[in-house]
Image (cartoon, grey):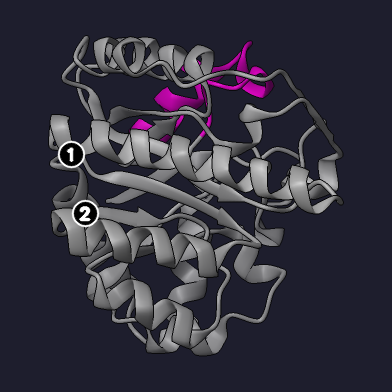
Amino acid sequence: MLIDSHCHLNFNAFKNDWKEIIENCLSKNIWMVNVGTKYETSKKAVEIAEEFSDGVFAAIGLHPIHLEAQKYDAWELGGGNGLKTIPEEFVYERYKKLAKSSKKVVAIGEIGLDYWRKPKTKRKLEEFKRKQKDTLKEQIKLARELNLPVIFHCRVAFDDLLKVLKEEFERNGEIKGVIHSFTGDWQTAKDFLDMGFYLGFNGIIFKLNLEEVIRRVPLEKTILETDSPYLVPPQCKKERNDPCCVKRIAEELSQIKKKDFKKIAEITTYNTKNLFGL
């Protein structure tokens, strides 16, 4: 058994065949967590999860890139067709109601900080970062209220995310969660691990040199993901990623960590179930 802890079958890239893909994955004993990035995709993730008795779950949240109007090319996202974002405001009670609407909601996410596309003037940059941090803190507050773990997104912002999380840790105690699509160095990884977080690895490991980090991160703090439809592992030989490709991530970790594939599958599955209460 394997679990894709982070996919987006709730995105338009799968609007015509998400059910077929999920049924295929379940037939191969691959479970999945569909992750929202704004209210619309969060709602869709819940609706998809409710279609299945088991093996399909949802996370809801407002991704930082959806706070601003931006245009992202496919290469900036790791594949797909590019994206135009329309600003959305995080409405606490609206997301709370959605989270409580289904037992299939197992996390708040993906949420976090993303400084990839940032303003050039100092004043606008400060406001840009403040808005992201404030929205992140509100969503962490919601996760605490609902006793749900958090799926954290972070791009070009590890220092600020660590600072926010350390302040939260000191003020309110531990936060359960995972740093999705981890791309940092070993020291950054250790900082997150010391706060109790899991680290998620996906197809980005075929593009960046993360072997040292992967070797040093305890398998007991590692979970697998695809970030479908993005970041297709080269072995999958397809244009659009999907949860079945999580097997390729497990195989790569097996080689890097020099551990048996079955052990990788067993422990990462246990980790994911433990984190999300599956």
Q: Which mark is residue 144?
A: 1
Residue flagged by tag 2: what amino acid is it? Ile
**Residue 18, image x and y in percent?**
53, 19
Residue at (69, 74) in percent of width and height: 208
In this view, which residue lies farthest toward the front? 123
Q: Which mark is residue 175?
A: 2
Residue flagged by tag 1: what amino acid is it? Arg
Marks 2 and 1, how far apart at CA: 8 Å
Q: Looking at the image, do the residues carrying marks 2 and 1 touch, with CB atoms under 8 Å apart? A: yes
Q: Secondary structure at mark 1?
A: helix
The quarter of the displayed image where residue 23 is located: top left
The quadrant of the picture occupied by the C terminus is top left
> How many numbered tags mark residues here?
2
Residue at (59, 61) in percent of width and height: 157
Q: Which mark is residue 68?
A: none
Crowding at dot 1, Cα within 10 Å, few <14 / some 14-19 / many 20+, comes out as: some
Question: In this picture, which residue range is highlighted in magenta?
Answer: 8-26
Q: Nearer the viewer, residue 215 or 196?
A: 196
**Residue 129, image x and y in percent?**
61, 47
Q: Nearer the viewer, residue 224 or 99?
A: 99
**Residue 83, image x and y in percent?**
78, 28
The quarter of the displayed image where residue 221 is located: bottom left
Residue at (77, 25) in percent of width and height: 69
**Residue 170, image x and y in percent?**
20, 64
The quarter of the displayed image where residue 88 is located: top right
Q: Secondary structure at mark 2?
A: loop
